[in-house]
Amino acid sequence: MPQPLSTENFQVVPPSPPIPFPSKPNRELSWKVASSLFVSFRYAWAGLTYAFFTQRNFRIHLLVGTIAIGLSLWLQLSRVEIAIIGLTSGLVLTMELLNTALESVVDLTVKQTYHELAKTAKDCAAGAVLISAIAALLVAGSLLLPPLLAVLGLV
Ligand SMILES: Nc1ncnc2c1ncn2[C@@H]1O[C@H](COP(=O)(O)OP(=O)(O)OP(=O)(O)O)[C@@H](O)[C@H]1O
């Protein structure tokens, strides 16, 4: 027959106070917070122009992505195919921007000193860009290349 539960082995925990729902972001450590949506876009644009003028790889990926989207429109691929090519091109550029952001944070943290963790962070970020670029190549190879070769009369 089941024994009635005893409270002897239980610890009475007072109920914790409810966690207040944050009405404002906690950004006390930030030097500056964008005051409006328009200002946020301006900072985002500043990041994009910084990456464009300082990162050769970003410029290359932007050019290749633009060519890929232009070709997919010219070859009249389906809407889904154009969307996949657009998404993949955007992914590579996004990875490149995140890589640039992470490089800046690492440099800010360790300056010009060697640190094994700095190396891991930068190498992994570079690896992420490489993976996205390989994925983009696969997408281009399977969606763009066959119709392009057909239009050029090579198959
Ligand atoms: N502070 C550091 N400590 C240890 N290794 C570092 C440090 N800074 C850079 N490295 C090594 O040097 C490599 C190149 O660094 P860099 O800052 O040029 O990054 P990157 O990703 O190659 O740059 P980019 O994307 O501009 O080509 C890194 O991948 C990392 O292996």
Image: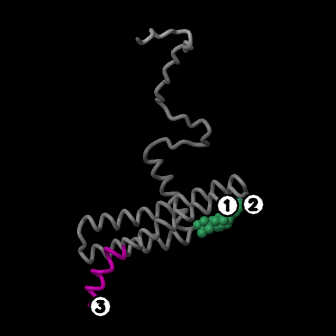
Drawn side of residue 93 relative to residue 69, left or right: right
If you read the primary sequence from the N terminus, does the residue marked by circle 3 or circle 1 appear first? 1
Colour convention of the picture: one colour
Measure the C-alpha gap from mark 3 to mark 1.
45 Å
Q: Does the magenta stretch include residue 153?
A: yes
Residue at (57% x, 64% y) in the render: 126
Q: How crowded is mark 2: few (under 14 residues within 10 Å), some or many (20 or more)?
A: few
Answer with the quadrant where ligand 1 appears in the image.
Answer: bottom right
Q: Which amino acid does label 3 sit on?
A: Leu
Measure the C-alpha gap from mark 2 to mark 3.
51 Å
Which image quadrant for residue 119?
bottom right
Q: Does the residue labelled 2 lie within 8 Å of ligand 1?
A: yes
| Numbered range of the magenta stretch | 140-154
Q: Circle 2 sits in a helix, a strand or a loop, which is it?
A: loop
Q: Which mark is residue 154?
A: 3
Q: Mark 2 points at which residue?
A: 114
Task: Kindly give the residue lying farthest to the right in the view shown.
Answer: 113
**Residue 7: x percent and y percent?**
52, 9
Residue at (39% x, 65% y) in the render: 88
Q: Which amino acid does label 1 sit on?
A: Lys
Q: In which quarter of the image is the C terminus?
A: bottom left
